[in-house]
Amino acid sequence: MTGIALSRRPVASLRRNPAAAWRHLDVTLVAAIGAVSALGLVMVFSASRGATPPYDYSFAVKQLLFLVIGALVMAAIVLVDYRRVRDVAPGIYGVTVFLLAAVLVVGSRRKGTQGWFPLGPFQLQPSELAKLGLILAVAWLASQFGGDVDLRRFVALLLVAAVPMGLVLLQPDLGTMLVSAAIVGAMLLMSGVKARYLALLGLAGVVSIGVVLKSGALDGYQKDRLTVFAQQDSPTGLDQSRTAAYNLEQSKIAIGSGGLVGKGLFQGTQTRLGNVPEQRTDFIFTAVGEQLGLVGAGGLLALLSLIVWRVHRSAQLARDEFGSLVCIGVMAMFVFQIFENVGMTMGIMPITGIPLPFMSYGGSAAVTSFAAMGLVLNVHMRRFT
Amino acid sequence: MSVDTPRHRLSILGIVALSLFAALFARLWFLQVAAAPTYRAAAENLRVRTVMVEAPRGRILDRNGTVIVDNRRSTEVTVDWQRFEKLDRVTQNQVLSRLAKELTRDRVRQAAGQVSADDAGPQLVTASAPVPPGSTTPSSPTSAPPGTTTTLPAGTVAAPPVTEPVTVAELRKRIDDPRFSRFEPIPVAVDVSEALEVSLNERADDFPTVAASRVTVRSYRYGQLLAHVLGTVGAVNQADLDLYQNRQKPYEVDDEIGKTGVERLMERFLRGTPGEVRYEVDARNRVVREIGRRAPVPGDDVFLTVDINLQYIVESNLAAQLLARRNACNGVGCEKFAAPAGSSVVLDPRNGQVMAMASYPTFDPAQFVGGISTAEYAKLTDPALNYPLNNRAVSGQYAPGSTWKLFSAYAGLATGEITPEMTITDPGFYAIQGCRSGSCRRQNSGGTANGTVSLSRAITVSSDVYFYRLGDQLWRRRGQQGIGEEALQRYYREFGFGEKTGLGLAAEADGRVPTPAWRKDFVKVLYKGDVAKQKAYEGWYAGDNMNIAIGQGDVLATPLQLANGYATFANGGFLWTPQVVLQVKPAGRSSVVKGFQAKAVRRVDLPPQWREPMLTGFEGVTSQPGGTARTTFAGFPQDRFQVAGKTGTAQVQGKADTSLFVGFGPSRAAQYVAVAILEESGFGAQAAGPLVRRIFEPIALTGGLTGLPKAPVGGSFDAAAMAASIQAPTNIPVDR
């Protein structure tokens, strides 16, 4: 890689330090992030501007602000060597656990979940940030073990993961809990845990999901969202009076009616007329599907898979186990969120409140996604130093 | 699993990620390519709302094109749901409370007669409406002015308007009623005054989302005239929708639909084709913009066979005649009849067209516009008020009495039991042959001995003995070839009795031609479970045959059936399906959409050698000495318009006799058959006969319908004044 770069731009390479970290910045990843964010901004605007003039720009403006803040956070993280981040990882972990505990006491409630700190006009969702704390903590601890994980160490890793996940479940925010589970699962797999432990863990996960659904931990609305996708094509049909069923139906109509090339920007009737509930946040993918069709939505999936591939590649190329594990955690987080979010809009996954990275409206999610990318870029560009 | 290295595990993660993306893309492909048409249609359905614009109903005109039912403009108050929904709850309540107050005030003022709901146009005379132009004397239709001693059913007098206060809750319920489309203004009050309309528009700031607008509603130019034939309109209900699936003219909640009469019969034509406005709406059903519209097309004009001027004569005289019978005096003294109800039909025997059709008591179809109150409707269906809503001309079933003798005579001729030349001696009574027990003698009414009577004479003087003998003989001969147990009944049915005529107006009755078999079934139902009584009454005897021969016993006929039976005789044997609709034309155009031709049910064989002597007999009724209606028609211009006819006086158990008369004329080339049936009114020649005379008189004097005096707009008449001028003919032959 470096050699090719040298031969292409020999003058520059002579004047500058060929080992400088910024020279190894993953431009492809940055470009992909930029493209998806820009598309997301346009989609948030189309889904929030209203049916008739005067159009509402407030959400688009706020989303732009979130993206800028996110990009700045990403840049800031890139500037600091990830190994220094590694050294403070336990501290970051402590802070996130504290925030998760605090939100249960002083947080505000929305749709049955106590997960937000009201900060003036904005709402901070600590469970979003906690995903990063979790990734860093597990990566830190696992890298201490150096690939030799016996049962005791395995339990230790699980305990580290279980504390924030348990707090998230108390809100209850099942979506974030599931993302966290995916993150932890992938990271454990890569930390050298024996396959049979992982199999047991998977079994325990399945059982616990069943227990959660059966117990009263989730209220009717949340449970409905989770289970409705399994009944959509049942012979008795969906009970359209159920909110979740209505959501799913409107979502599928929006995407399906987009067809091959879509109805055109601002021409989507489902999007323009506000027929898809929560479209600018969790159901933003429907705006793409309706207005830009298979070409646009397929293109978006391609861009997202490009991001995932670059993260995966960074994990491969990482200089140390900590870096690699961080990338694996971020990759798992992205893959799970993308699959779950896009899947639920198309009726192949249960409906949960998981945002689509760089697309969904929302500040906490945007900052978390950018910060995660900052970590990956950091690991990637410092793979030689 | 043999080579479990971190590198392998990373590859596995990559493959997992890749397959998840592949799954998403596959699902995306399915939704956007394979299932796209379905979802595209669903999205379009969600986007577009179509709002119907109701079209004005077609008009109803008489045979000469005189408009009878039109549409008038009325003012209704509406609330725009689209904007109302955006107001906050407090403002909503303020608006509704103000509106309720204004509406209540308007109701009170309208009731007090200070303001009127209608803009210019002929209207029924009621307490709250101005006197229509063209009527010189302020009088209420078919009812007596105050001060007369007559007692009329209250149902015929316009009820005072109700002045219950309008409440906020009532208004809100109406606005929230999900059956109303939220894309058009929701009507909350109809027929408000112009003053309120002006006030609401002036104070628009106090009444946001409220509007007063003009709508078209049914307007009855001749008031109550022809009410039963015209029928009523009302808001469409589920039962209507099941009957009237109409793709071109779909119905919406609160749309007007014909409920009875011609409004019902011709619904498919009278209903206009609704226009539509297509809106794009958002997820909360708020209109974003208009996409397109189609103008409504008014319904077709329906021309009736009825002549409105003749109808006026028939209907006013029917009411007057009944009123007169309630206060009747003759030479002997004053005998007051109940005379509560009656009916009259005029048919054109050449084609079965209904020229006039009246039923008393009647009602005001305008009451049904915009919905009739339960109390008002209860009055119209009250037995104590003699069911004003019933059209007795088609649904009233009466014993026809002596008018039935035409059909018995035909049966006698057809079976050969009698011949025109044959005479019998009528000593005033008839002894049943072979009778040994019970009452074996039947008397003529009044016991009059008519001496030697032929067929003609038997009809003219209405000899019961002649027809008793016929009934008795036919029953005795029932075992013979070609006679059977139903020798009379067979020929009654020939003339259309015992089944609906097919006029098409709702609630038409079958009438009844009783037979031995019918008796058996009837008794079984009547004495259910009581076998002894069943056995005692199930038999059919000579006396039964004699009874039906003179139109008594269990024979029942509707006025229309009777008119149609006589029309068949008058025209030489064609039994027509009577018709009340002449043609249908598109609004404002002269091309006929649908014309209705005369339709014969069958041809009754009436050779001249039978018909001629019978006709002579019917002519004699009104002109020959001994004719039962000779006095009734004394002084009638028979030279210009010879009337043939038959009186009937039917006995009804526990009540005074039903007075019947059927006349047709000119007798040799009949253009009119008139039936009059007056309940509890006495002899046929005393009540029904004079009514038919007064129907025929103007026709005879002016030589047809064209010269008849014009029916006044509003259709009102002074029944009391008319009744006062009616003198019952005295010294008439007693006739059953």
Image (spheres, coloured by chain):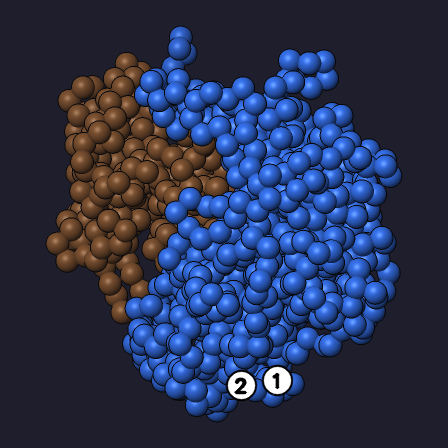
Which amino acid lies under the numbered mark 2 shown in the image of this protein?
Pro
Of all chains, the one bearing label 2 is: B
Q: Provide residue A109's location: percent of width, then percent of height.
A: 22, 55
Q: Give whichever of B656, A78 is nearer the camera.
A: B656
Write the residue at 36% across / 25% down. Answer: B527
The quadrant of the rendering that contains the N terminus of chain A is top right
Label 2 close to label 1 by CB (< 8 Å): yes
> In the drawing, does residue B191 fall left or right of residue B654?
right
Q: Provide residue A243's location: percent of width, then percent of height.
A: 37, 45
Give the colour chain A carries in the figure. Answer: brown
Q: Provide residue A257's location: percent of width, then percent of height.
A: 61, 44
Q: Give whichever of B561, B290 is nearer the camera.
A: B561
Above or below, B102 relative to B304: below
Write the residue at 69% across / 45% down. Answer: B459
Write the residue at 34% across / 77% down. Answer: B163
As drawn, the label of residue B135 is: 1
Residue occupied by mark 2: B138
Secondary structure found at label 2 = loop
Which amino acid lies under the numbered mark 1 shown in the image of this protein?
Ser
Give the colour chain B carries in the figure. Answer: blue
Residue B62: tell me if it is visible. no
Tag count: 2
